[in-house]
Image: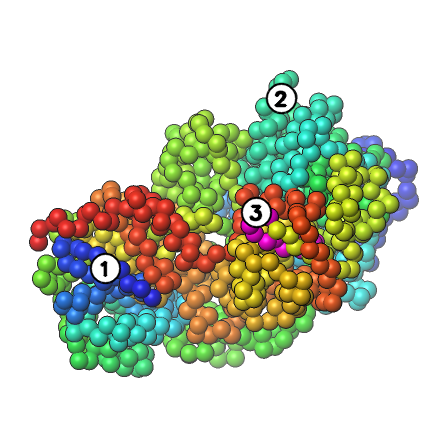
Amino acid sequence: MPDAAATSPIATPNLPQSFRDWFDEKGWHPHPHQIEMLDAARQGRHALLIAPTGGGKTLAGFLPSLIELAEAPHEGLHTLYISPLKALAVDIHRNLLLPIEEMDLPITAETRTGDTSQSKKQRQRGTPPNILLTTPESLALLLSYTDAQKIFGRLRTIVVDELHALAPNKRGELLALGLARLARLAPDARRVGLSATVAYPEALEAYLSPTGRAGQSDVARVTGGGAAAAEVKIMIGRGHFPWSGHMGTYAVEDIYEQICGAETTLVFVNTRAQAEILFQALWRVNEQNLPIALHHGSLSAEQRRKVEAVMAKGGLRAVVATSSLDLGIDWAAVDLVIQVGAPKGSSRLLQRIGRANHRLDQPSRAILIPANRFEVLECQAAIDAVKEMTLDGDLPSDGALDVLAQHILGTACAGPFHPDRLYQEVRTAAPYADLPREDFDAVLRFVTDGGYALRTYDRFRRLRPTSEGLLSVVNERVARAYRMNVGTIVEAVTLKVRMRRGRFLGEIEEYFVQGLTPGDTFLFAGQLLTFEGVRETVVEVSPGGDGEPEVPAYMGGRLPFTTHLSDRVRVMLEDDRDWPALPAPVEDWLRMQQWRSVMPKRDRLLVEIFPRSGKFYLVAYCFAGRNAHQTLGMLLTRRMERAGLDPLGFVASDYVIAVWGLEEPRREDVEALFDQDMLGDDLEEWMAESTLLKRTFRNVAVIAGLIERKLPGHEKTGRQVTFSADLIYDVLRSHEPDHVLLKATRADAARGLTDIRRLADLLVQVQGKIDVRALDRVSPLAVPILLEIGKEQVYGGAVDSLLEEAEAELVAEATGGNMQAQLPI
Amino acid sequence: MSVETFHLNGVALTADPAGILFWPERSLLVVSDLHLEKGSSYAVRGVHLPPYDTAETLKRLALLVSAYAPERVICLGDNFHDLGGPGRMSESDRNALAALVAGRDWCWVTGNHDPDLPEDLPGRNSLEETVGALTFRHESNRNGIGEISGHFHPSARVKTRQRHLSGRCFAHNGQRLIMPAFGTLTGGLSVRDPAIGAVLGRSFEILFLGPRRLYRFPSKAVA
């Protein structure tokens, strides 16, 4: 954790002698921000530390607690450390023990995660350590115990690590509510947030402030020294530069060459599937047998830990990794980061290149390898953004109501509460600072009896009023159910993958498994595997096999690129002065587009229409990201259907959407197609029946506690499943469309997978500013998206026609016809 | 909505994509696994599923009963989700059920979820029914001939050009047929599950319930 800062000595009046000696012994000097954090602590202020990775951030967070505890021993829990990752908590704990042991400090420090033994957890509740390192979910659990006051009453400091990664999502919302609870239990506890460089520091200040609002000057903002500027460049491989695709395997020889030339390389990719494929490709060209490993979130924890350990010891030359390595663990030895595929956001790129050379005085070295032509533009935009330090990122939005439901039930488990007081408390959590009372009441009613207009569940309440006007859980069973379901991470249902009579390799989604038949091959955990079958809830595989292997895909694996990068790409397209700096094939491509069609303008929408093999294509250059484009595609095809244009399907990328049909859209149709009123009834209708909304509902229902999550090993086999979220969604939608869970579902869909807001902004912006070009053939800029057809999921087509096709294909084999007449009565 | 006609043990039956069978010759309608009051049975344990499933199930059934106007209706067991179901039924659902039963021979075949139905429930109870060449029971005895049963809630996943579609289905091998579950909150069991294979053998036909009609697939073609 502590790193060797090579800066010149600074004044350290706040640092006790023993700590100064310890720094000296190590040959280290405290960073200025570490001292500033100490000052904030002495003044009793909350503090937000914003520093790049490797800036000694964690030590800065802990130093005040270590000094306080060294100066005055403390009975019970003093400092609570919360990390988004279990592994990170464990890692930090190990590093924290170093100064404690080396200075012989009278401090106890322990971790508490899902992996901690029951007996240890029990003991920790009775006798908590001085420093407890845990996760948001474990904290929520602790807060639900009736002895929460006893555990947390003497708490002095709360450290939230990787705050930027937690704050904008539901885990962060649950944690914010937990912090509000802690403020009740331990009013004197100081909050400390540690964050990477972010676009919206005010939002994090609000998050840390016990008022839930920014600008209260109760949070000291400390900024860590900027790292030396990174050396980042774009490289396209020597092979044929692809028009489309996202894997980047065309450049595998070049990637390998770079790995050979560096000590240790981190190869970042965007999806787990890409990691598997690139890893295979690298090993095919690995003539020197370099130790190259694979790391992604679906691999078994054991396997990941092994890779991390070997990596830390310097035993690897390269690791192909997804965002599973974005956070946490410091890799001092890494001297090169390669990002294969577009970085999708400037903050993400900054974070990833920060993984190289964790020394503030040395620049990180990074190479971006775009997988196709559009990605070159996106890579360049990201590099420019990092250079100018203009960052992007999700602005935390209004807290989700399903998370609130979970918190209310958790609070009730800890003891009776007064609704008015809980409402006041909840509003001190930043995500819920503006929560209307009626929303709170609706959620409270949901928690009590399901909150249905038909009040038939009065008899079956989970909360009942006490004589003092408080609400209390009706029995211990409710509390047990809550504790089994705590947390906001709702993973797709996954199945473990095991070698026949061998070890576990990791987990893949049930969805993928259902498409496999025994004998099929797939790539997973860096190997070619043959699917043998599913036994109980385990996928059995054997090594090797024939045929073209499939690669497991994962829901939500691909992030859309940020608005910030999108804006930059549009500027680059409009202004051709910088094109000569782009790789030659890309510049040629853009010039061709200028010649054959026009370039999309920054503040306008270019729509091209052209015929191709008997169909008409409409290509719109929206640059609003995949999710927004997919929503747009659904809406456009609906409209085209009504306009008699016989749409057949559409395909969406981050940059472009292409729709095709049998009739040629006329110039004047286009304005109407993109009219912003499509966000009204059309959207409502589509959202209501889309499978996407059903999936969202499932997550909401699990988080809110309506559906119990499937626990590993508890799945039923050989019997019909108990009920499905889809059915509940349908019945609720037809009988009570305003139910609070449907409201939460719509809010989720709007901010998440469908990117409604981004789409709305786009439509408003282009009203009256659409440039329509009718061409006689495909334009150069449209080639990449047309190539995606056949690779990407193509949408459109009603359920009935899909089934008809499938049936027709099988009609010859059908056993139906001949088995009927011959049976005697 | 278009229906599909097929034969079971020589009997011509009409399958409706809503998930019921009709036997025109006998004016007999068959429906299975209503699981009435499933929502409230969870609510008792503090899991507040929407309380609308009974009303919804009865409403859908009423539409079919009025369309086919059967003289006889057989409900193939698991009519209520649990023993306490009839007692938790709301007044209006009770009335809706009584209106359905009135004027026809209504037979509740009892299932594992509801072995005893209360006396005051309209309609008559039966462990199993035999009508002509067909026998109706809740759970297949695995070697019945001309047997129509429920219990398993068969469902199938059909691979189409774009994506997999999952849904309820009838499954039969010419001798035995398993009905889809009709209840609003009832889930499904894949027809590839060994439990269904034990009834129908390795090769059978499924009738997949599409939005507007039924689709026929061999069991091998679905997951």
Please tell me whether residue A761 belongs to the stretch shown in magenta: no
Chain to which mark 3 belongs: A
For the point 45% across and 48% down, the residue is B161
- Which residue is nearer to you in this view: A619 or A710? A619
Q: Secondary structure at mark 3?
A: loop
Residue type pointed to by label 2: Asn
Residue A286, numbered label: 2
- Which residue is nearer to you in this view: B142 or A203? B142
Task: Read off the residue under disc 3.
Answer: A613
Residue type pointed to by label 1: Thr
To the question of a shared chain for discs 3 and 2, the answer is yes
Task: Report how far apart the C-alphas of labels 3 and 2 lie in the structure.
Answer: 43 Å
Q: Secondary structure at mark 1?
A: strand
Task: Read off the residue under disc 1.
Answer: B5
Compared with A672, A258 (above or below) is above
Task: Report how far apart the C-alphas of labels 1 and 3 lie in the structure.
Answer: 41 Å
Residue A678 lies in what quarter of the image?
A: bottom right
Where residue A641 appears, as percent x and y from the top left, is: 53, 63
Range of residues picked out in magenta: A612-627
The residue lying furthest to the top in this view is A288
Compared with A600, A312 (above or below) is above
Chain to which mark 1 belongs: B
Q: Using a 10 Å C-alpha cutoff, classify the residue at mark 3 as few (fewer than 14 neighbours), some (14 to 19) or many (20 or more).
A: few
In this picture, residue A567 sits left or right of residue B213: right
Residue A332 lies in what quarter of the image?
A: top right
Where residue B96 appears, as percent x and y from the top left, is: 28, 79
Tell me the mark number nearer the camera, choosing from 1 and 3: 3
